[in-house]
C-alpha cells in the first residue's frame, strides 16, 4: 500500500504503525459490505473518542515498552462484545504497533475510520463523486480563513459548527462525503480542516491507484483539454492522474500544476514573478 499525504503529520514510527493498521483494515474488510464498513468506521471513531477521554488507557495501549500481546489482550478485554470482530481486529493491530506518541494512536484510529468510509464508497461505486466533493469542499474552506478558523476551533460550539457545515453541504452531497466532513470538523487532525479534506481526497484518489494533479487555470478547461492534459501528465509521471481543477483569473494565462510536492508553473503571472525576482 502506498503512502499518502495523510501520513505527513506522523513521525517515522507512527507512519509505519499507521501503514500496518491500514493493511489490517484492508485484509479484514475484503468481504465486508458497504454497510458493514460504515459500522466499522463508527466504532473505530468511538474507540478513538474513548482513548481521548481516558489518558491512562491511551498511554497504556500505546506504550511500546509493554509486550505487544499484553496490549492486544487489554484491547480484547475492553472491546469484547462491544464491537464487531473486524473492528476489534483493526484496533488490536493498531495497539500492537509502535507509535511515536500516544496521541498518534488516537489520530491513527481516526484516519483508519475515515479510510473505512472511503472503502464503503468504493464498494458502492461512489468513490469518484466523494473524491470530487471532498476536494471542492476543501477549496471552499481554504478560501475563507474565518470559516477555516471556526470549523477547526475545538472550543467553538459543536452545534454551531454543525449548522455551518450543513449550509456548506448541498442536499446532493454524497452521504460518505457528509460523514467524513462531519468527522473531520468534530475531530480535526493535521493542520486544519481544509488540509484534512484535501488529504482525504488524495486518499480517495490513491484507492483508485491514481495520483492527484491540482490544476489552476485562468478559465475553465474544456473536456477535451482536460483529457489531453491528464494524458500528458500520465505519460510524464508514468501513472494515471486525477485532475482537481481550480479557476484562478489572477493567472492571466497558462496553467499552474501541482503533483505532490512538485509544482509546474506555466502561468503568465508565474513568469512575471520570476522575471521580477531576476531583475530585483
Image (cartoon, rainbow, N blue to C red):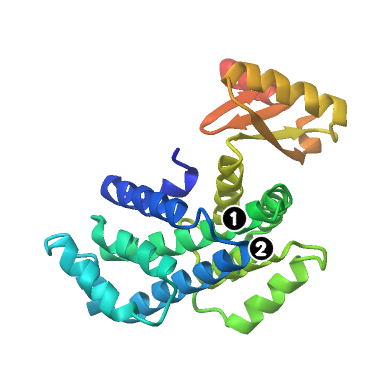
Q: Which residue is mark 1?
A: 118
Q: Quadrant of the N terminus?
A: top left
Q: Quadrant of the C terminus?
A: top right
Position of residue 216 measured from the top left corner of the image (x, y, whole percent): 72, 34
The dot on residue 176 is 2
Q: Is residue 236 visible in this depiction of the protein?
A: yes
Give whichever of 23, 259 is nearer the camera.
23
Q: Quadrant of residue 156?
A: bottom right
Badge 2: how crowded within 10 Å, few (<14), some, or many (20+)? many
- Residue 147's spot in the image, x, y percent? 65, 65
Query: Number of marks in the image?
Result: 2
Measured from the top left, where is residue 13 in percent x and y?
26, 48
71 left or right of 134?
Answer: left
From the top left corner, tell me how far across and down residue 97 is, in percent: 26, 56
Mark 1 in CB contact with mark 2 (< 8 angstroms): yes
Res. 189 in view: no
Q: Secondary structure at mark 1?
A: helix
Question: Would residue 71 appear left or right of 251 to someone viewing this image?
Answer: left
The label shown at residue 223 is none
> For the residue carrying disc 1, how many other residues have a C-alpha within 10 Å: few (<14), some (14-19), or many (20+)?
many
Residue located at (37% from left, 48% from top): 19
Is the residue 17 above or below the residue 61 in the image?
Answer: above
Q: Residue furthest front?
A: 31
Tell me the residue at 79%/26% (across/down).
Answer: 227
Give the mark nearest the N terminus, 1 or 2.
1
SS class, disc 2: helix
Q: Residue at x 59, y 49 (%)?
A: 198
Amino acid at each position: 500500500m502506498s503512502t499518502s499525504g495523510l501520513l505527513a503529520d506522523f513521525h517515522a514510527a507512527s507512519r509505519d504503525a499507521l501503514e500496518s493498521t491500514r493493511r489490517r483494515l484492508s485484509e479484514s474488510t475484503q468481504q465486508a459490505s458497504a454497510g458493514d464498513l460504515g459500522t466499522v468506521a463508527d466504532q473505530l471513531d468511538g474507540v478513538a473518542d474513548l482513548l481521548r477521554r481516558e489518558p491512562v488507557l491511551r498511554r497504556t495501549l500505546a506504550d511500546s515498552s509493554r509486550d505487544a500481546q499484553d496490549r492486544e489482550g487489554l484491547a480484547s478485554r475492553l472491546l469484547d462484545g462491544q464491537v464487531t470482530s473486524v473492528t476489534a481486529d483493526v484496533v488490536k493491530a493498531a495497539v500492537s504497533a509502535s507509535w511515536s506518541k500516544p496521541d498518534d494512536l488516537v489520530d491513527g484510529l481516526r484516519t483508519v475510520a475515515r479510510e473505512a468510509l472511503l472503502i464503503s464508497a468504493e464498494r458502492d461505486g461512489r468513490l469518484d463523486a466523494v473524491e470530487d466533493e471532498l476536494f471542492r469542499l476543501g477549496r471552499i474552506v481554504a478560501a475563507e480563513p474565518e470559516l477555516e478558523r471556526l470549523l477547526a476551533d475545538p472550543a467553538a460550539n459543536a452545534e454551531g459548527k454543525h449548522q455551518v457545515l450543513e449550509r456548506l453541504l448541498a442536499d446532493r452531497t454524497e452521504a460518505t462525503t457528509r460523514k467524513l466532513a462531519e468527522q473531520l470538523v468534530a475531530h480535526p487532525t493535521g493542520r486544519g480542516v481544509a488540509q484534512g479534506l484535501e488529504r482525504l481526497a488524495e486518499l480517495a484518489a490513491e484507492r483508485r491507484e491514481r495520483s492527484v494533479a491540482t490544476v489552476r487555470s485562468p478559465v475553465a478547461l474544456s473536456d477535451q483539454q482536460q483529457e489531453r492534459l491528464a494524458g500528458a501528465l500520465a505519460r510524464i509521471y508514468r501513472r494515471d492522474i486525477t485532475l482537481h481543477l481550480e479557476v484562478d483569473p489572477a493567472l492571466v494565462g497558462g496553467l499552474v500544476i501541482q503533483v505532490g510536492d512538485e509544482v509546474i508553473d506555466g502561468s503568465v503571472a508565474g513568469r512575471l514573478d520570476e522575471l521580477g525576482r531576476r531583475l530585483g
